[in-house]
Image (tube, grey):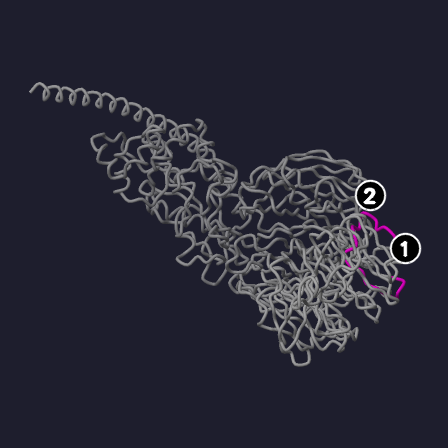
């Protein structure tokens, strides 16, 4: 009994403690609700004050409208009479928030009683403006007396959910997190059912919702419901890129029954907001812009569109609203056609020597054969002309010359098609005079890319051996006359660098690579392998290359800087017994270079050339490997990667820094081909001459001449460049770097005349205004920095900063009058800025729909909406450029393609001409100053393509460009 009483006392004590705790929690929650109500009352008072000011402006706006269009007076009188008949009270779903006046030119003019400059987020219901003076004062006083938290929220939640929310108390921050983790919603409702709701009767007043089809900026403290997109405007089918005419089926203002209850978890950030109504309802300029975005009118049945007609496209589920310009009357009847202009590949700047071997040959026609990206270039050195073999679908990796010096075999890396499926690999055998493909060897047989190819020599190139890029590095031999495979064998799991037939015996094949030299014998369709024995000599880590001497010996160059002479030794029967076989051993070791021996070349008289890596030397050796002459390659060109004999005296040298040199030991070497050595992004064309600039991750800034097809000059910066733009006078150029720093270079002296830093993140775009008086710098810190430019582009002073984007800046353009900027950001946002007004963000984007732009490089905009393919994820297009004639627009995509569209192309699935050749994502495109050429820049392929623009009246052939139309 005693224990029973003790237990009852404990329960009673616990109960009284719980009651006290519950009462304390209730007091805290009630106080929090009162604070929120006070805050919302302040917000509505501010809104009512603005409405009062706007009502005073309404007669003035009406008079201005009638002055512009006298016919509007009759329409306005009819609307006023209709409103008076209905007692000034309009249906909830009416569209009377705007006065629509038919204009004489077939458009519909929309006279909104709320000026566009007013924040929609502070507007209240329009019904109160239609009452008489006394009724209006009473109506406004009732609104002030009946505020509640729910008035600021959104529609769409049922009464049951609202009741549940009202039952739930406001919990402290820590309690809220713990409680939701441990218990379900049902248990919370059950435990708190005894707590009464603290709310007053709510009358017909509301604050407009912040939801407008856009998610809020990252980090904004808004309820999930406020950031959720509404599907009522987009319709049931919202494909990633589907244009939708926005019908104003819902009023801009909502009534009392449309509000949405605030979720409990959002009460925490609301308590910490400042008392200012602007901070409560407009969390950021970005969100304020979305809240004020006008809704589109439906237009007449005859197809005329209202001034606020807009189109929506979707990228990764995010709607992007674009307003139709006034000069487009019937958007739905617009027909998209491909442009009449076409592109023809004119020149390629670059050479792939950084990571490839044996990819440079000299033809009897005077042409050097090499490859870069997906194209094999035939460059006539004396005539300075190029021809291009473009049948490869991915980056070319290997190349060899037939003994007849006409046919060429080439292979590419493993690629995928547009659907992501592997492309069937093969070896292309083609004619170097006609550029016609003669054979495709091994089509459907190779499942990986091709690493090395070689023709047999003794039988005039009947056989072809191939090493693929699989893990086993399969060696296969093919009969070129029949196109059939003769034999196949696994070589090694280590890297294989080269393969060759023995010049005196087509049944003997040699391969070399990481820590090995293998001698293969082919007999009756079977391979026999013998490893090279290093014996007393140090085994090098890599055997980089090999050639055959005139006596048939194998000479290899290795990573130790040695040239090893290999020979066949008789079987050592005394040591190994009767089963011993002949072996290949090192007969001689010659120290040649410091560092690796990258390449060996046999000259016509039997002499040998070797190229070293670390010492950058080219050494000429006699037939018995006695050094004769040597020279050193300048450091800016790198080391020799491959050497091609021209006439026994003059040679071509491909270097590790993607350059091709021509010269002799007596006269030295000069560069005939140069290129970047790392990923490129920055591209700019000169405003008045045929010159362009490129910059990339190799920290080089290069200036090229498009007429002479050569590099004019280059400098090396401390940081790598990502963007650039020429001043309109052409005397200076600005280059944006990866650290937030940007420099101004003098085009004549090549000196840095200005150096600035804006933020600590990389810069993505530099753009001068049309008259050169301002410079806009777009950064990854979400800001656009504006500078005043004086003294012909030599003096820069900070004017202001555009602040409003919620992600990094990607593209921007100036208006033709130099007063406005259009910009894109990484979250697919389009914003407009009034620079003359102090870098002011234009909240109403509708006002910019008819503005003309000096350039068009923004990838998001009404005039270029058609360049986006269905299903694009927002990063598929890297760059875009409109021609100066405003007739075509070129697009650089992420799938190695260059597209040419007709400008404008405002409808999805616009047809285009598509051009291939790049082996990596195309990072940038630009037209030259006279639109005669288009320049495209590959990222990882480190190549710049110069395309000639062929117009309909041009007689030039477009056969080599091989465009394909797509839609």
In this rendering, is residue 310 above or below 282? below
In this rendering, is residue 627 above or below 292? below
Task: List the single residue furthest toward the bottom.
Answer: 482
Q: Nearer the viewer, residue 709 or 59?
A: 709
Name the disc covering residue 629, or none.
1
Residue at (85%, 50%) from the top-left corner? 632
Q: Earlier in the sequence, mark 1 or mark 2?
A: 1
Where residue 348 appears, x then y in whole percent?
74, 60
Query: Which residue is labeled 2 in the image?
Result: 750
Q: Quadrant of the C terminus?
A: bottom right
In this rendering, is residue 816 above or below 281? below
Where residue 470 appears, x then y in whole percent?
59, 62
- Secondary structure, mark 2, is loop
Q: Quadrant of residue 89?
A: top left
Crowding at dot 2, Cα within 10 Å, few <14 / some 14-19 / many 20+, comes out as some
Question: Which tag is nearer the camera, tag 1 or tag 2?
Answer: 1
Q: Nearer the viewer, residue 825 or 445?
A: 445
Q: Are marks 1 and 2 in contact (CB under 8 Å)?
A: no
């Amino acid at each position: 009994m005693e224990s029973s009483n003790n237990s009852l006392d404990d329960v009673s004590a616990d109960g009284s403690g719980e009651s006290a705790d519950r009462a304390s929690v209730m007091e805290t929650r009630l106080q929090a609700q009162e604070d929120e109500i006070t805050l919302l009352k302040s917000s509505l008072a501010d809104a009512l004050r603005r409405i009062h000011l706007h009502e005073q402006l309404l007669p003035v706006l009406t008079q201005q409208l009638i002055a512009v269009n006298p016919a509007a007076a009759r329409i306005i009188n009819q609307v006023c009479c209709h409103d008076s008949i209905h007692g000034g009270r309009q249906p909830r779903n009416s569209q009377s928030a705007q006065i629509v006046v038919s204009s004489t030119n077939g458009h519909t003019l929309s006279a909104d009683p709320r000026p566009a400059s007013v924040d929609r987020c502070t507007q209240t219901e329009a019904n109160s403006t239609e009452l008489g003076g006394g009724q209006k004062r009473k109506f406004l006083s009732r609104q002030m007396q009946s505020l509640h938290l729910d008035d600021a929220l959104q529609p769409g939640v049922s009464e049951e959910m609202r009741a549940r929310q009202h039952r739930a108390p406001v919990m402290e921050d820590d309690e809220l997190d713990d409680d939701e983790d441990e218990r379900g919603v049902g248990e919370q409702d059950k435990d708190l059912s005894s707590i009464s709701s603290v709310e007053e009767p709510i009358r017909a007043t509301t604050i407009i919702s912040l939801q407008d089809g856009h998610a809020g900026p990252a980090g904004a403290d808004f309820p999930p419901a406020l950031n959720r997109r509404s599907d009522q405007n987009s319709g049931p089918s919202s494909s990633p890129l589907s244009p939708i005419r926005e019908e104003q089926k819902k009023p801009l203002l909502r009534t009392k029954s449309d509000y949405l209850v605030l979720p409990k978890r959002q009460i925490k950030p609301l308590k910490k907001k400042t008392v200012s109504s602007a901070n409560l309802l407009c969390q950021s300029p970005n969100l304020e812009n979305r809240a004020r975005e006008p809704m589109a009118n439906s237009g007449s049945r005859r197809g005329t569109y209202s001034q606020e007609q807009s189109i929506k496209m979707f990228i990764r589920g995010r709607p992007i609203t674009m307003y139709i310009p006034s000069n487009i009357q019937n958007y739905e009847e617009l027909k998209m056609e491909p442009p009449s202009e076409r592109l023809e590949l004119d020149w390629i700047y670059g050479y792939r020597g950084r990571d490839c071997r044996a990819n440079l040959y000299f033809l009897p026609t005077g042409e050097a054969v090499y490859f870069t990206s997906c194209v094999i270039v035939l460059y006539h050195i004396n005539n300075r002309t190029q021809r291009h073999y473009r049948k490869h679908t991915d980056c070319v990796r290997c190349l060899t010359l037939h003994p007849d010096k006409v046919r060429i075999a080439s292979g590419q890396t493993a690629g995928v098609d547009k659907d992501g499926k592997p492309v069937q690999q093969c070896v292309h055998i083609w004619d170097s005079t006609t550029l016609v493909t003669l054979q495709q060897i091994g089509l459907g047989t190779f499942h990986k890319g091709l690493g090395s190819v070689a023709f047999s020599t003794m039988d005039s190139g009947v056989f072809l051996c191939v090493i693929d890029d699989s893990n086993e590095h399969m060696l296969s031999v093919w009969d070129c006359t029949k196109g059939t495979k003769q034999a196949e064998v696994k070589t090694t799991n280590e890297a294989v660098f080269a393969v060759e037939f023995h010049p005196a015996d087509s049944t003997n094949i040699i391969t070399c690579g990481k820590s090995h030299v293998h001698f293969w014998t082919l007999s009756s369709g079977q391979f026999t392998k013998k490893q090279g024995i290093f014996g007393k000599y140090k085994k090098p880590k890599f055997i980089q290359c090999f050639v055959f001497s005139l006596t048939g010996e194998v000479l290899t160059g290795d990573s130790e800087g040695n040239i090893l002479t290999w020979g066949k030794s008789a079987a050592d029967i005394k040591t190994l017994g009767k089963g011993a076989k002949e072996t290949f051993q090192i007969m001689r070791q010659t120290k040649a270079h410091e560092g690796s021996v990258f390449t060996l070349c046999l000259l016509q008289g039997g002499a040998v050339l070797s190229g070293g890596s670390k010492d950058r030397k080219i050494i000429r050796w006699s037939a018995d490997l006695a050094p004769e002459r040597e020279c050193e390659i300048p450091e800016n060109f790198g080391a020799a990667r491959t050497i091609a004999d021209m006439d026994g005296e003059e040679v071509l040298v491909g270097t590790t820094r993607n350059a091709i040199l021509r010269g002799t030991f007596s006269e030295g070497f000069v560069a005939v081909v140069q290129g970047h050595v790392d990923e490129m992004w920055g591209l700019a064309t000169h405003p008045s001459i045929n010159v362009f600039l490129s910059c990339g991750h190799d920290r080089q800034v290069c200036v090229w001449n498009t007429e002479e097809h050569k590099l004019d000059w280059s400098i090396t910066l401390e940081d790598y460049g990502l963007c650039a733009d020429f001043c309109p006078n052409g005397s200076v150029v600005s280059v944006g770097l990866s650290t937030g720093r940007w420099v101004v270079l003098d085009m004549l002296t090549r000196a840095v005349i200005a150096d600035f830093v804006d933020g600590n993140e990389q810069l993505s775009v530099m753009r001068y205004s049309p008259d050169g008086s301002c410079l806009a710098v777009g950064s990854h810190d979400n800001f656009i920095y504006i500078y005043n430019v004086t003294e012909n582009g030599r003096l820069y002073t900070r004017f202001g900063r555009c602040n409003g984007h919620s992600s990094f800046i990607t593209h921007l353009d100036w208006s033709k009058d130099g007063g406005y900027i259009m910009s894109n950001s990484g979250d697919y946002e389009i914003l407009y800025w009034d620079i003359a007004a102090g870098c002011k963000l234009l909240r109403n984007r509708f006002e910019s729909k008819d503005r003309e732009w000096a350039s068009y490089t923004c990838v998001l905009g009404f005039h270029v909406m058609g360049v986006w393919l269905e299903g694009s994820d927002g990063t598929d297009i890297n760059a875009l450029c409109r021609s100066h004639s405003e007739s075509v627009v070129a697009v650089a995509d992420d799938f190695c393609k260059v597209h040419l569209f007709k400008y404008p192309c405002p409808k999805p699935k616009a047809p285009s001409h598509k051009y291939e050749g790049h082996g990596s994502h195309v990072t940038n495109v630009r037209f030259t100053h006279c639109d005669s050429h288009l320049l495209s820049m590959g990222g990882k392929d480190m190549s710049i393509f110069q395309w000639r623009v062929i117009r309909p009246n041009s007689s030039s052939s477009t056969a080599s460009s091989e465009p394909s139309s797509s839609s």
